Image: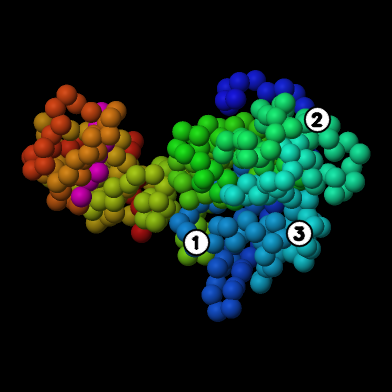
Amino acid sequence: MTATQSRPQTSVSNPQAAPVKLEGVTKRFGKTTAVQSANLEVQPGTLVTLLGPSGCGKTTILRMIAGLETITEGKLSIDHEDVTQLSAAQRDVTMVFQSYALFPHLSVLENVAYGLRVARRPDAAEAAEEALKLVGLGGYGSRAPSQLSGGQQQRVALARALVMKPKVLLFDEPLSNLDAKLRRQMRNEIRAIQQQLGITAVYVTHDQAEALAISDVVVVMSAGKIEQIGTPEDLYRRPANAFVADFVGEANLLQGTYDGQKLGFGNVFLPYTQPGAPTGDVRVLVRPESISFSERGLAGRITSGAYLGAMTEYTIETSAGDVLIAPPSEATILPNGSDIHLDFRSNGLYILPA
């Protein structure tokens, strides 16, 4: 089942979407500070992604929301209720894990219904079947998890979380065990279901493309700190600093000059205005798609090239720094050592804050 196919209307919806708020939340493990003074508001019904490299603290924040890690300092609220000191069982949240965490000795239906049976819900089987229909696995209830593909097992894990009708749904890198094509399909399905149900979701990943594709808001983290919070477009086009610029998508960070009206790279000057940007010698974010070969422009020399099918990726040495460019593949691939010139489109440039 793909994200574009229609899904049956089910009774697993959650109209009471809940906000989540972190106020000065800090987590220490001994002398190591994993998360430092995190402030974050997740609006009801939105999908917010925590994005960053391994060890940046994103999973620790997720586990603190779930109640699986205690908070050293600060306050955590879910649906306007202070849950800082509440156990995981006392919080109305569920989590979809990276490892699926399915019981191998139970059928698919029994796995999905497990939480409801523990809660002694008489409608456990019916609710579980409805949840399976929601994720495109209607009729799979009698199978064993071992009879399913990785993508199907992830759907079962999602159904098991959704059937509890949580106030907040948490995802801990749920797609990292899937191949690239299936990851793309599953991320679209997760997003479609989240929007259909209007549920509040917090999602953890280190995959930039995944974060940009599915999120209402992205939180970029580094070394336990939140570097920037914004929409995918904000982060891509207007990064707060060099770390965000370099981590979110492919980026060229070049040395240039700016006088308030023109932006210069070596001997090339472009009309450009960016209110509030520093002047003089500046550092400029240049996205690869905003650069093209030209007969004039910034002079450079190709130092490496890689044919990628639809495009060819070149690294070019220039007086402003090394430039990555990925134009559509031409009939003839330019060899290393070729002298070329580069043209820049102003809508792909951004002067980084001082």
Which residue lies at the image location 57% right of the left edge and 25% below the top edge?
A: 2
Crowding at dot 1, Cα within 10 Å, few <14 / some 14-19 / many 20+, comes out as: many
- In the displayed structure, 304 sits above or below 25; it is above
Q: Residue at x 52, y 65 (%)?
A: 224
Residue 327, magenta (yes or no): yes
Q: Which residue is mark 2?
A: 11
Q: Nearer the viewer, residue 242 or 315?
A: 315
**Along the polypeptide, which appears first: circle 3 or circle 1?**
1
Residue 222 to residue 122: above or below: below
Q: Is residue 138 magenta?
A: no
Is residue 212 visible in this depiction of the protein? no
Give the CA distance from mark 1 to mark 2.
Answer: 38 Å
Taking the view exactly as shown, the residue that stands out farthest to the bottom is 31
The three-letter code of the residue at mark 2 reads: Ser
Magenta range is 322-328
Residue under the image location 75 percent in, 53 percent down: 78
Residue 325's disc number = none
Label 3 sits on a secondary structure element that is helix
Number of numbered discs on residues? 3
Give the percent coordinates (x, y) of residue 300. 12, 44
Task: Point out the residue furthest to the top here.
Answer: 6
- Check the picture and name the quadrant holding the N terminus: top right
In 3D space, how far apart are the residues under numbered discs 3 and 2 (Cα atoms)? 25 Å
Q: How would you rate the neighbour count of disc 2 (Cα within 10 Å): few for under 14, some for 14-19, many for 20 or more? A: few
Residue at point 54%, 75% (across, down): 32
Q: Which residue carries the number 1 mark?
A: 56
